[in-house]
Image (spheres, rainbow, N blue to C red):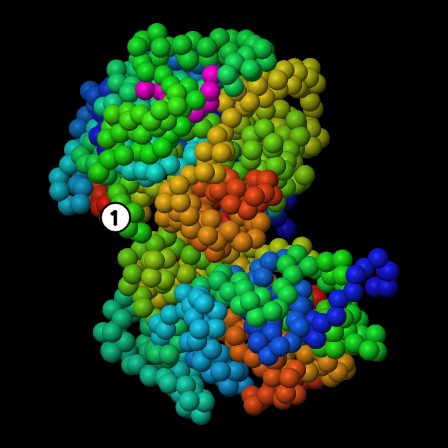
Amino acid sequence: MTLVRLAETARARVAFTLDGAPAEALEGDTLLTAILANGTHVRTSEFGDGARAGFCWMGACQDCGVWVVGLGRQRACATPVRAGMEVVRL
Amino acid sequence: MSTPALATQQADVVIVGGGGAGCSAALHLAQRGARVVVLERGLVGSQASGVNYGGVRQQGRHPAELPIARRAHALWQRLPELLGTDCEFEVTGHLKLARDEAEEADLVAYLDVARVHGLRLRLIGRNSLHRDYPWLGPRVVAGSLAPDDGAANPRLLAPALARAAIAAGAQVLEGAEVLGLAHDGAGFVAEAAGTLFRAPWLLNCAGFWGGKIAATFGEPVPVSPMSPLMLVSEPVPWFIEPNLGVVGGNVYLRQIRRGNIIFGGGRGENDPAIPYARALPGPAMRAMRLASELVPALAGVQIIRSWTGIDGEMPDHLPVIGASATTPGLLHAFGFSGHGFQLGPAIGAILAELVFDGRTDLPLEPFAIGRFAGTTASTMGDGT
Amino acid sequence: MSAPVSTVAVVGAGPAGTRAAEVLVRAGLRPVVLDEAPDNGGRIFQRPPPGFTRPYEALYGSVAPQARALHAAFDGLRGRVDYRPSTLAWHLRPGTLHTLSDGQAGQVDFAQAILCTGAMDRVVPLPGWTRPGVTTLGGAQIALKTQGCAIGRRVAFLGTGPLLWLVAMQYAKAGATVAAVLDTTPLATKARQAPALLAGGRAFLTGLRMMAWPRLHGVKVVEGATPLEITGTDGVDGLRYRGGGREHVLACDAVAMGWGLKPETQLADLAGVPFDFDLVQRLHLPRRNDAGRTPVVGIYLAGDGARIGGAELAELQGARAAWSVVEDRGLPLDLPEIARLDRAIAAQAGFRRALDLAFPYPHALAAEMPDATTLCRCEAVTAGELRAAAAPHDLNRAKALTRLGMGRCQGRVCGPPGAEVLAAALGCEVSEVGRLRGQWPVKPVPLSMAAE
């Protein structure tokens, strides 16, 4: 999945890590946006049916869960990215 | 009961209650050629036997129950042959944990009970335990492993038993609440689903509601509704092999191969008149704390659902199994007090023996309904 | 002895919740307003994070004035309500809401609760719908509105209903490439409702303009389309569909799909509100009257969380339900205002019904999805597995046997299409298979929330 930034691109940059690698987002990004700006998926189904990248973007479908060190499992669509966050895709 | 519009159907055995006990009784009786009718108010396995924790455990049972549990264990291993499905039964081992010295003493004391009944147990000391199960929390001081115990998917058992019973010739009626029940001198008469069912045998497998049936036949028992509270987590990578319990039983947990962690402890709320049962947040949060104490890695895991059902609880936590003390032809099997799931498959076999052979090899004296003789209305539970 | 609880709780700070809180404050009350989002506005009028600069007109289009008014109304309530953003209400028992905030469990005891829990997209699973690059229509809109992002370079819009056309237009206006708009509803179905839709006045005209927009701007439009599969390897590379009697492949790298909305009824369910099957929306909906009262004392419902009616109706219902609370507490009423609300709510009925009929949920498409389609995306249960287990006429028993709806979302997404698959397999009406029973928590909560 390729997220395309169409507007609001003048925001400050935020550094975080994704699966241990340095990554960059913009202030005000949700983790879902931040991850999809750096990769093509957000999680992998536990049941062998492939990668997922969220679905509803409104905290309902629960298909964008990621692990944030110190915070545990979070819905990426409802969690703002913060500088220094260590995000692990499950 | 005497409404002339009702059709009449003759059977050999009428079973009230389509849980694990009732459906397995239907299967065993039908296999021996009996004309069996199961009357189930809702769907089979809707209450205690269908919405429990799924533990298939012999360890820790009251000594009186162990012979039945041993027999059930043999049947669990034959489920694919008996039912065409294993109901996700898996021998995972049951690891019972002690969190202090007093609890450890309890584990040690049970070793003798187990030995008498031929149940394999292995006591594991603190160092070995933490080496073998490095994910256990520091408060755990000892464990007792029953390698032959395991767990199964409770949602599958009663429906699978019912299917097999039907295939063997039994009639299983769902949505068939019993509106009237009596013995008219010649035999039992049960009104349900617009029909009068007549039979010389009546099997009371009605769980908590079995108390009402017993009272109908003049032998009230002090049975109360109980709703063991269950929680399930999201799937996480599989790491907990054995089914875990603790001395005292205030928390128990297991992980299924799909990754979900199923755990329970404490009680939910219920209203048997509806029937309605739901997990309660207060006890649930206590179970969450106890579970994370047992397995600290669970702290960051998420709960995705809770559930419970209604079982009948007896004051001595032993079920009522065996012949009525008042009414020939009436057999009871209810009040499993939250631990009947594992026993279910054997209960049916025992009831079938009582019907056909008039006896069973297993000692049923501890479960006799007569132990509550003298119970009066004022001491009885809600269901009587 | 502690004083009896007299709190009014409002769950949700969208259109309905904001207007409910406004009436309660006016009546001299100080409600607790719980909202899962970090800021108010609900989904339709969701505010972008601080630091975003696009004006209201760019964010909310033709409903910018309503968005501005609602935000201003809420801002005027700050300090006069006990506002708790970023707070999930995960269970409701009589008199108590159980909450999660900042990782900690909490509770709010209430005398009355107005549930304004909003809605989510209603979908039809199809092969490939779990791929990265497929979102709901609402999701695609939120990506644009609150993150300034398009979900792909070349986006296909699939489904039916006003949101389909709205989001496609918003994407095109924002500079995204719209591969096509595929509406599963044939033109004739919509045209039949035109006379009744006229009652919508300005809303109807806005809708017509929205539906004309893609054609006027050279965007491909197919009405009466039947989607077959979303294709791709790692993500999305195309959408296979049938239209005009032929099969086509549309090249795209993202698909936004949705067939109207469905209410988030989980708290009403836990509260014990009875549900009735609604023949028009083809859903089991919580019972409440026009004044927002439910058969459960102390529980009131308003907005899309009870029945889909849109933001304008939600605002009216939120205010009306709050007046019911005011009345039930024995406080003075503004009878002319209540009469005005009742008239305004009643006046919308014909238009809303026509809208439901003009953009029907394509139940046959759901019922006939191929066996291999992942129906429950949480638990990876296929339509074929559900069909194979379809013994009793009961969706909950099917859930018990297959794990359909047992996962993290508790059947929010797969429940309605699952009911269609099961009913078709059994040859019965969809109303007969029931609805998935809810259990708490209504959304996943961490074990660690229980820490003392």
**Front residue of this view, candidates C356 and C267:** C356
Relative to C58, is B54 above or below? Answer: below
The percent position of residue C117, horizontal first and vertical second, equals 50, 34
In the rendered image, is residue C19 in sight? no
The percent position of residue B116, horizontal first and vertical second, equals 44, 92
Amino acid identity at mark 1? Leu
Which residue is rendered at x = 35% and y = 72% of the image?
Answer: B92
Residue C183 sits inside the magenta stretch: yes
Residue at the limit of the structure toward the front, as seen here: C245
Residue B26 sits inside the magenta stretch: no
Which residue is rendered at x = 40% and y = 82% of the image?
Answer: B107
Quadrant of residue C146 within the rendered picture: top left
Instruction: Determine whether, in the image, residue A35 is placed left or right of residue C355.
Output: left
Secondary structure at badge 1 equals loop
Which residue is rendered at x = 30% and y = 81% of the image?
Answer: B124
Relative to A57, is C164 above or below? Answer: above
**In the picture, which quadrant includes the C terminus of chain C?**
bottom left
Quadrant of residue B148 within the rendered picture: bottom left
The residue pinned by badge 1 equals A90
The percent position of residue C395, horizontal first and vertical second, equals 53, 48
Which residue is rendered at x = 56% and y = 49% of the image?
Answer: C394
Range of magenta residues: C180-187
**Front residue of this view, candidates C208 and B235:** C208
The percent position of residue C118, horizontal first and vertical second, equals 49, 31
Query: Disc 1 is attached to a residue of which chain?
Result: A
Relative to B98, is B298 above or below? Answer: above
